Image (tube, rainbow, N blue to C red):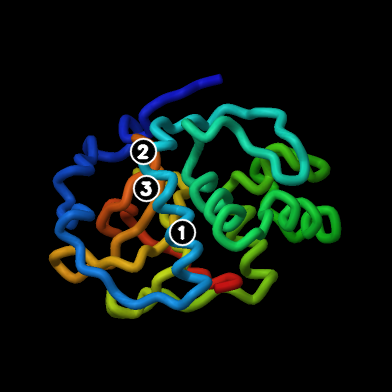
Amino acid sequence: MPVFDRREFLAGGLALAACGGSPAEARPRQAGGKAQALIAAARAQIGVTLAYDSGYSAIAYPGGDIARERGVCTDVVIRAYRDGLGLDLQRQVHEDMARAFTAYPKRWGLTKPDRNIDHRRVPNLERFWERAGARLALPSDPAGWQPGDVFTSLVAGNLPHTGIVSDRVSANGSPMVIHNIGAGTQEEDVSVAQRLIGRFRWQV
């Protein structure tokens, strides 16, 4: 099962530490109760999930997970919704794909849902949230992002990525995000996420 630093794949050798806006410099902003619970559950993964691991794993259902010390960007979101709001994206995505498999992306060559991995793929989460009516327009101003929003982006040109907008803004006024882009769960300036393509607000 491969464990690697995803930063090796980012164009130009993206230096995460150079993006500015570390949590120590960040300023807090107000978040609603559910959004705050989601963010707290995401932040609790910092220092726990220390590696990026994209390997396929057979996991329990429902409530399945790989070892918490490793994972991918989607695992940050999945764990936060489970721990913070009691919502199991593994189950919800699987059930929706079982109802409407043809509505989901076909890029992995599957002929039926796979509850071990479907929810851990960014394009599937995007489609699930779209079908749930949770997609919002990308804000024209950084201040338009709300704590608890989920972003999706493309890094290194075409690698799907996701994470949660936190209740802090960086020293330059950009929202902070909690995500795993290669070195485990981190809270960083949104610019690290590169080209933003999606914004979702679900159950917060």
Q: Secondary structure at mark 1?
A: strand
Residue type indicated by callout 1: Thr
Query: How far apart are the two marked residues, 3 and 1, measured between alpha carbons?
Result: 10 Å
* Residue 110: quadrant of the picture: top right
Residue under label 3, please give it. 155
Amino acid type of the residue that numbered disc 3 sits on in the rendered structure: Val
The reply to whether discs 3 and 2 touch (Cβ–Cβ < 8 Å) is no
Q: Secondary structure at mark 2?
A: loop
- Give residue 100's position: percent from left, percent from top: 82, 60
* Residue at 71% from the left image edge and 29% from the top image edge: 58
Residue closer to the observer: 55 or 27: 27
Question: Farthest residue toward the top?
Answer: 1
Which residue: 71% across, 33% down? 59
Extreme residue toward the right, this view: 99
Q: Is residue 135 above or below residue 195?
A: below
Which class describes the residues within 10 Å of circle 3: few (<14), some (14-19), or many (20+)? many
Residue where numbered disc 2 is placed: 47
- The residue at the point 64 percent across, 76 percent down is 133
Graded by Cα atoms within 10 Å as few (under 14), some (14 to 19) or many (20 or more), the crowding at tag 2 reads: few
Dot 3: element: strand
Could you tell me residue 123's position as x and y percent?
58, 53
